[in-house]
Image (cartoon, rainbow, N blue to C red):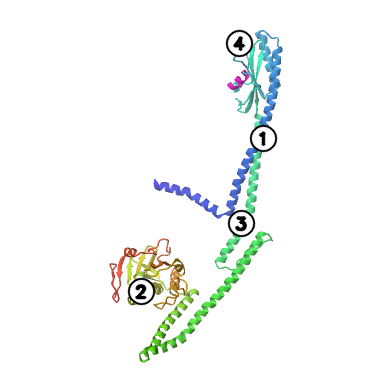
């Protein structure tokens, strides 16, 4: 039942969601529908007001004529009754018959007559009175008879005629026949003509309202289209400009505001094209310069390296200060060579010439190799590296040297900033991706430093020297390598609580998704819960329950 209810709910919600998407995405639809709703509401209110005024005017005029006519005929009837000499029942019956015939002739077919004996009539003279129309007597209400009985001046009431159901008016008047006692005379008028006139007027108003609303909607659509069409064209041109088609321009027609907008947009596009072209040329020259300088420096660097190696090998034969200079020269040459290699790599990445060789590799093996490589440096600095690998496989398609370089940079960065504390490394995987988290508990990073930690040559503390000889490009190259794998390299930190870096790589063409295999800001307890613990100690490496061993 619940599944059926969900299916029905989804089927009902789909059209609403589709309509909502169209409503939010189409300005023309919103303007036209809003105009339609406002137009229909305005026309409906105006039509109701006009119809009410016309109806009241027709009815009021008709009632005035009815009251005047009924008052005249009632006075005529009373005058004839007062001057009548009929005394016996037969003469009185004939008098009443003649009187009703005369009243019917005066009123025409649109008026009916009802004559009733008053409840307080005590006369013994019986009179037979026929209605002018069958069933007309039932329109005379008790309230009307009571009003006539107490001699209310010309009482009247709206009624519905029995045969046709048309609206009508009943006007009452007393009639006293000297020899027969008091009677009640009622004039019944039909309002069918007024109703027909009102219906005709309503039809004309409805037709006019429909035509008016259609014209308003058409004009709104036309005006909106005139205004929206250039905006849509500008959106299409802007989208093509964003895709790199810098020669796209809007069509300029006329000299109005829209044409001015198109002209201004084209001028902006031309300015952007010039700026982008200039920046591309400048960037190309810059990359070419860095690449050429890096290549040109290799030849003299090789010569200097050969001379430095000779001096370094013979440093024990020199005076102490000369031998120390030879050691410093060798160390700085190592750093200079690393800097040249990083500059060449950055140049290749910026030029889009980086070549990747993908293969199925277990990320845990890559991390173990890199941890093993930095163990001597960690031992020298008194840093304990703890590796945690979750159960299962951690294979993904990757360029192993580049991924190894990313992990190596993260480990070197963590060891340098751990202040002698431990460094935790975790490897995890799920269906869509694999992850490596490197966490230290040293200096930490502020939110501002986290935002800039991947910038080239940026240092959190410019006064702090690099103990491991970094070039300032390692994290920047690591992030570019992660992007080349369609992955992500993220950072987290808090001052005094350490920093954490997480590398995410996809396992399938679906991408990484929203849920990562490992959290970015992991605590020490989280690493223990992440999987089997592997402890490293120089020079031996022993693996935990996940199996395998290496030394």
Q: Distance of mark 1 from mark 2, alpha carbons?
A: 94 Å
State the residue position of label 4. Answer: 122
| Nearest to viewer (mark 3 / mark 1) | 1
| Magenta-highlighted residues | 142-149
Residue in front for this viewpoint, 544 or 212 = 544
Q: Mark 3 or mark 2, which is nearer the start of the sequence?
A: 3
> Disc number at residue 370?
2
Vertical side of 313 occupied by 236: above or below: above
Name the quadrant containing residue 537: bottom left
- 3D distance between C-alphas at marks 2 and 3: 59 Å
Q: Which residue is label 3 attached to?
A: 228
- Image position of 22 (left or right of 380): right
Residue at point 55%, 73% (across, down)? 280
Residue 395 rendering spot, x and y as whole percentages: 36, 68
Q: Are marks 2 and 3 in contact (CB under 8 Å)?
A: no
Residue 269 disc label: none
Distance Cα–Cα, label 4 vs label 3:
87 Å
């Amino acid at each position: 039942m619940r599944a059926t209810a969900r299916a029905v709910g989804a089927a009902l919600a789909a059209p609403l969601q589709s309509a909502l998407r169209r409503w939010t995405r189409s300005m023309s639809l919103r303007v036209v529908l809003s105009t339609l709703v406002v137009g229909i509401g305005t026309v409906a209110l105006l039509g109701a007001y006009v119809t009410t005024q016309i109806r009241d005017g027709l009815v009021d005029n008709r009632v005035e004529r009815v009251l005047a006519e009924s008052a005249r005929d009632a006075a005529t009837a009373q005058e004839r009754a007062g001057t009548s000499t009929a005394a016996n029942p037969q003469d009185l019956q004939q008098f009443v018959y003649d009187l009703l015939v005369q009243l019917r002739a005066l009123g025409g077919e649109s008026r009916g007559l009802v004559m009733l004996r008053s409840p307080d009539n005590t006369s013994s003279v019986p009179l037979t009175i026929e209605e002018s129309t069958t069933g007309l007597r039932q329109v005379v209400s008790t309230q009307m008879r009571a009003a006539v009985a107490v001699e209310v001046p010309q009482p009247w009431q709206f009624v519905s005629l029995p045969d046709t159901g048309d609206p009508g008016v009943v006007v009452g008047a007393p009639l006293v026949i000297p020899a027969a006692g008091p009677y009640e005379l009622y004039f019944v008028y039909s309002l069918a003509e007024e109703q027909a006139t009102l219906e005709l007027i309503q039809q004309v108003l409805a037709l006019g309202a429909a035509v008016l609303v259609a014209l308003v909607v058409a004009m709104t659509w036309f005006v909106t289209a005139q205004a929206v069409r250039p905006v849509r064209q500008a959106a299409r041109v802007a989208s093509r400009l964003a895709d790199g088609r810098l020669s796209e321009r809007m069509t300029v027609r006329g000299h109005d505001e829209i044409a001015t907008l198109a002209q201004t947009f084209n001028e902006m596009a031309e300015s952007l094209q010039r700026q982008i072209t200039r920046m591309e040329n400048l960037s190309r020259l810059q990359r070419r310069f860095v690449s050429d300088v890096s290549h040109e420096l290799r030849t003299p660097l090789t010569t200097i390296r050969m001379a430095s190696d000779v001096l370094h090998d013979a440093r024990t034969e020199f005076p102490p200060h000369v031998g120390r200079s030879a050691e410093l020269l060798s160390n700085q040459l190592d750093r200079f060579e690393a800097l040249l290699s990083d500059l060449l790599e950055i140049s290749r990445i910026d030029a889009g010439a980086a070549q990747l060789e993908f293969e199925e590799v277990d990320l845990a093996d890559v991390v173990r190799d890199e941890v093993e490589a930095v163990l001597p440096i960690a031992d020298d600095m008194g840093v304990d590296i703890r590796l945690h690998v979750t159960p299962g496989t951690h294979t993904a398609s990757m360029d192993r040297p580049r991924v190894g370089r990313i992990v190596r940079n993260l480990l070197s960065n963590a060891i340098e900033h751990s202040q002698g504390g431990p460094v935790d490394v975790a490897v995890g995987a799920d269906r869509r991706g694999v992850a490596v988290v490197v966490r230290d508990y040293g200096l930490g990073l502020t939110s501002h430093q986290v935002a800039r930690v991947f910038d080239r040559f940026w240092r959190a503390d410019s006064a702090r020297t690099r103990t491991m000889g970094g070039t300032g490009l390692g994290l920047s190259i690591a992030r570019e390598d992660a992007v080349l794998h369609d992955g992500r390299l993220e950072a987290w930190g808090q001052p005094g609580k350490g920093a954490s870096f997480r590398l995410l790589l996809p396992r399938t063409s679906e991408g990484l998704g929203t849920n990562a295999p490992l959290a970015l800001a992991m605590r020490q307890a989280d690493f223990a819960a992440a999987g089997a613990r592997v402890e490293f100690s120089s020079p031996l490496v022993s693996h935990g329950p996940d199996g395998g061993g290496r030394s």
